[in-house]
Amino acid sequence: MQTKNKIFDDLSQLMTNAMGVAQGAKDEAQTAMSSLMDRWLADRDFVTREEFEAVRAMAQKAREENAALAARLDALEAKQ
């Protein structure tokens, strides 16, 4: 009876170790994939969200200024 318990204990320990190795391999694969994606995105010269929002705000301000100048020109032309 003691031999069976030892076999089950060894088998249980083996399965526990195998799960640990599998978890480690999964974590390593995720890290490698994340690093690969980061390098790929960096090579594509994509802009960050902050950069996009800054340029968008500048374009909006330029459109508003352009509209104000156009209105002033129309007012000046109407006076002449």
Image (cartoon, helix red, strand yellow):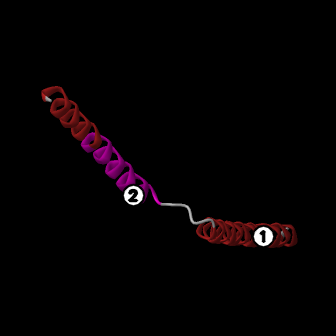
Looking at the rendered structure, the kind of residue marked 2 is Glu
**Which mark is in front, 1 or 2?**
2
Which residue carries the number 2 mark? Answer: 50
Q: Residues within 10 Å of mark 2 (few under 14, many from 20)?
A: few
> What segment carries the magenta color?
48-65
Q: Quadrant of the N terminus?
A: bottom right
Residue at 50% from the left image edge and 60% from the top image edge: 47
Q: Are marks 1 and 2 in contact (CB under 8 Å)?
A: no
Callout 2: helix, strand or loop? Answer: helix
The image shows residue 71, relative to residue 44, as above or below, that is above
Residue 58 is tagged as none
Residue at 82% from the left image edge and 66% from the top image edge: 8
Q: Quadrant of the C terminus?
A: top left
Residue 18 is tagged as 1
Question: Residue 43: horizontal and vertical position, in percent?
Answer: 63, 70
Which quarter of the figure has residue 77? Answer: top left
Callout 1: helix, strand or loop? Answer: helix
Question: Residue 24: horizontal and vertical position, in percent?
Answer: 69, 72
Give the mark nearer the N terminus: 1 vs 2. Answer: 1
